[in-house]
Image (cartoon, rainbow, N blue to C red):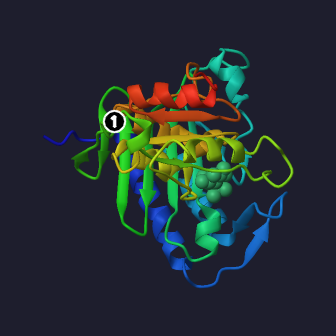
Amino acid sequence: MLRQPNSETQFAILAAKAAGRILMEGFGTGVRIEQKAREIDLVTEFDRRSEALILGRIRKAYPGHRILSEESGRSPAAPALRGEARGEGGSGEEPIWMVDPLDGTTNFAHNLPLFSVSIALCRAGRAVVGVVYDPTRRECFWAERGKGAYCGESRLRVSGNTELGGSLLVTGFPYDAWTNPDNNLELFGRFSKRCRGVRRLGSAALDLSYIAAGRMDGYWEMRLSPWDVAAGGLIAEEAGARVTAMDGESDYLSETPSLIAANPALHAKMAEVILRRP
Ligand code: IPD
Ligand code: CA
Ligand code: CA
């Protein structure tokens, strides 16, 4: 039987869908692309318009809550996430919304229909609500902590593939990959020799949602941002994935998350490859 989302989840779902409609107004119309700090890190008017809509709704509905959002950063009252997780720099009790108004900007800018809107609500350093909306397929992935994960009305479950050799993995590469040797390419090669295939879709939030849906078996990626993974990480966990930092054990939600997500047996095998255990 379908569980009804709570009021915060319903709010996030409606906001993500409204933001998705904005993105679809621009998708495929040849939007103007701007470069951020690095040549390959892009932003468009639609990242900003989507963000303005979501942040406006949050401020109106939850004026006391804090916000951490990709294009406009932290709301002034928000302490560093890492500090908050440790209980420093604030009570750690004020809820914080983590927003990626367009996850997959490079795909969007190249007219590739693989991008999403990601909204999470976190309490005491953990996501309690996560919503990832893909406006091109009209798929809405959502989860509440302890209550399961869904795509629309369908309950999600991770794949039961426990062997690397039969697994389809997904990953991504950091924006400083041209210059930083710690760029995931070596690991990409290592996994490519051990599994059925490795995909690079270009939206971390969708990667994690696809792990939840059993469309991919395992995911790893390094040096992301909290808004990339807060919602998708919860959705994957609630579908039965083990989601950790790349050491295979600790919490993944930090200032620069690096993570592994897969069913527990495959997660252990992925961690062994990453940590180069025999
Ligand atoms: C990016 C996507 C991509 C991941 C990058 C992210 P953006 O987010 O999630 O899959 O590999 O590291 O920064 O910039 O499109 O919002
Ligand atoms: Ca992102
Ligand atoms: Ca983004």
Q: Which residue is mark 1?
A: 239
Q: Position of residue 26 (x, y in %)?
A: 56, 78
Q: Is residue 106 rendered to the left or right of residue 206?
A: right
Q: Residue furthest bottom?
A: 29
At label 1, counting other C-alpha atoms closer than 10 Å, the crowd grade (few under 14, some 14-19, many 20 or more) is: many
Q: Is residue 154 rendered to the left or right of residue 238?
A: left
Choose top left, top right, bottom left or bottom right for residue 49. Answer: bottom right
Q: Residue furthest left?
A: 1
Choose top left, top right, bottom left or bottom right for residue 46. Answer: bottom right
Asked whether 73 or 102 is in front, the reply is 102
Q: Is residue 248 rendered to the left or right of residue 197?
A: right
Residue at point 53% right, 70% down?
Answer: 23
Q: Position of residue 88 (x, y in %)?
A: 71, 15
Q: How many marks?
A: 1
Asked whether 184 or 76 is in front, the reply is 184
Asked whether 115 or 24 is in front, the reply is 115
Q: Position of residue 126 (x, y in %)?
A: 52, 26
Q: Which quarter shows the N terminus?
A: top left
Residue 180 in sight in this render: yes
Please state which amino acid type lies under the numbered disc 1.
Ala
Residue at point 28% right, 42% down?
Answer: 156
Looking at mark 1, is its residue's CB closer than 8 Å to ligand 1? no
Asked whether 128 or 265 is in front, the reply is 265
Q: Is residue 129 rendered to the left or right of residue 180?
A: left
Residue at point 30% right, 34% down?
Answer: 148
Q: Position of residue 191 (x, y in %)?
A: 57, 42
* Mark 1 secondary-structure assignment: loop
Residue at point 45% right, 51% down?
Answer: 132
Q: Which quarter shows the C terminus?
A: top right
Determine whether 263 is above or below 138 in the image.
Answer: above
